[in-house]
Image (cartoon, rainbow, N blue to C red):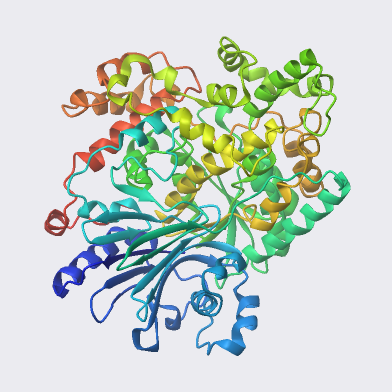
Amino acid sequence: MCGIAGIYQKQLIRDQSRMELEVGHMNQLIQHRGPDGFGHHFAKNLRTGLTHRRLSIIDTSDTGRQPMVFENGKYVISYNGELYNYIELREELRPHFPFRTQSDTEVILAAYLHWGDQCLERFRGMFAFAIWRDDLQELFIARDRFGIKPLYFLEKNDAVYFASECKALLPFLEKKTIDREGLKDYLAFQFCLDGKTLFQNIKELLPAHHMKINPNGVSIQRYWEVSYKPDFEKTADYFENELSELLHESVKFHLRSDVPVGAYVSGGIDSSAIASIASEMSADPFLGFTGKFSFSADYDESKYAEDLANSKSFSLHQIDIVENDFVDHIRKVIYHLDFPVAGPGSFPQYMVSSLASKYRKVVLGGQGGDEIFGGYTRYLIAYFEQCIKAAINGTHGNGNFIVTYESIIPNLVSLRNYKPMLQEFWRDGLFEEMDQRYFRLINRAPHLGDAIRWELLEDYNPFVSFKNIFNGENVGKQSYFDQMTHFDFKTLLPALLQVEDRMSMAHGLESRVPLLDHKIVELAATIPSNIKFENGDMKHIFKKVVQPLLPDSILQRKDKMGFPTPLVEWSKKGPVKEFIHDVFHSSKAKHREYIDNSKVIDKISHESKFGRNLWAFLCLELWQQEFLDQNHSIENITSQNKINIS
């Protein structure tokens, strides 16, 4: 786990000092990602400059330093991530490459030189890397299948800048402005679509894509796609056995490390299953980490984390998160995120990562289970409507795709706390087309009202981008369940992985996500929805597979909260209320182009207990204060030495 950045000059320049200055500052701006060392490399003709921050996990010796240079600069690699099957690939490549280190970095380069672009199909892991080929004057950049490791880029005049985090690209923007389409995506979903960010001109290299930069320009290509092709010939027992085998194999691979490994333990099924398997396989004393809000039992899931730790006999470290922590750290959270994304879970994740980093350099997490196997309550809400529609239309007989309304009824108890959402969802558009209904269910924009100056954003409709993803060619139109999980897998999951990466790396901590092994994802895409979602039981097949691993208290719970934060309740009084008042009453906040913060203040004062409007508006304003109002030029960074905020 590390940080990478670099510059590619389409037109050769001769100002070496300027190139060194720019690359050096990019390195400093991501130094929190790698406290164990750094390095730079410049091509002989200054076509490219690469830089690296190191967090030593595999091959912690000096031979693992990066950028790693071969054949006197003919090939150079700067790499962030972990290649879990590097041992097997090294043995396969040994006849073709003179290995000189024990690092997975060298394996990636060897694989690229032997198989070319197709090497990506053989990798099991999380990665973002750049390989310089002096013979071709070309930079090859690639990102893992799911977007676990980040990569952003900026094209400016005759140069391309890239980095693990957007903040390292800000000094090269001629003007920092909000991307209006990205903003409208954020207001609708709390994440951006199609590689947009909230920074105009800074783009995200999408997951499962690679980029080639040479004197002729930039080309981007997808190298992997999950295809939803249900296999109706296989039984539920077959899928359960295959999933169990792959799950244990993935955890075994993810435990590969030259330093001890721990785990996040939230009390939910996903993280609990991963921690359970890992604790049994780990050669080192296993540690778990969790956070709680003792402010109220409504926000405290620590009992379930304690149940797992007790059942598996490993030590559990806990942090009690209080309102002063929010005031003290929320600006740092926004700084490390680069731009607001997803929900308020980033704040407690930041706090738990801080705790974990005191004891471990690597932790495992359960990210991905909800998107792969269908764990969000909104799936049940939307599917319930489709069951009724199918019953009315007489089309419920196709059991391969439709869970019958009779069978789903026993599981509707999960909706007990979602009555307001049901009322809102069914107020308009009942029985519309499936894409329109799911968009209506997840679209947050209507709740923001006149606090947004919508007339300035009318030239873009997020539903168009949403529809293209929801109705993708790789997912069957008959399976509503697959379409919903597919959209979230392609959009929400990368947003959550952004949180996962940034909140851990803010503390020099590597977070690994074993459920996001491509073999698990590809298997899940072949499981018919009536098996994955039997009788409307969310994550049915996954729960059956992990049942032997978990205490009954975790398996039977119907109240999984997803690390809720008592922000709304904190905002009613005390230090959080004062902090929010100061944020929205600043002189800059009163004159935002797209947000009328005077109306925001009134709107958030009537926020519901678990509402997300306060979080959305607060993060957006804090982001503007940190990134749009501040001077991020290289000259200003140099004069203020504004580098280490973690």
Residue drawn at 63 percent across, 70 percent down? 85
Q: Nearer the viewer, residue 166 or 335?
A: 166
Left/right of residue 96 with respect to residue 445 in the rendered view:
right
The answer to whether 215 appears left or right of 319 in the picture is: left
Q: Position of residue 344 (x, y in %)?
A: 46, 34
| Spot occupied by residue 47 in the image (x, y as percentages of width and height) | 26, 73
Q: Quick check: 112 left or right of 474?
A: left
Would you place residue 293 above or below residue 634 in this image?
Answer: above
Residue 360 visible, this orientation: no
* Residue under the image location 77 percent in, 15 percent down: 393
User: Residue 31: percent from the left, percent from the top?
Assistant: 32, 62
> From the viewer's perspective, is residue 140 above or below residue 591?
below
Q: Nearer the viewer, residue 210 or 380?
A: 210
Outermost residue toward the front in this view: 216
Task: Please say whether residue 124 is visible from this viewpoint.
Answer: yes
Residue in front for this viewpoint, 618 or 450: 450
Give the left or right position of residue 445, taking residue 216 as reference. Answer: right
Q: Residue at x 25, y 25 (%)?
A: 584
Q: Position of residue 92 (x, y in %)?
A: 65, 81
Q: Give above or below for 242 relative to 562.
A: below
Residue situated furthest top in the rendering: 427
Number of labels in the image equals 0
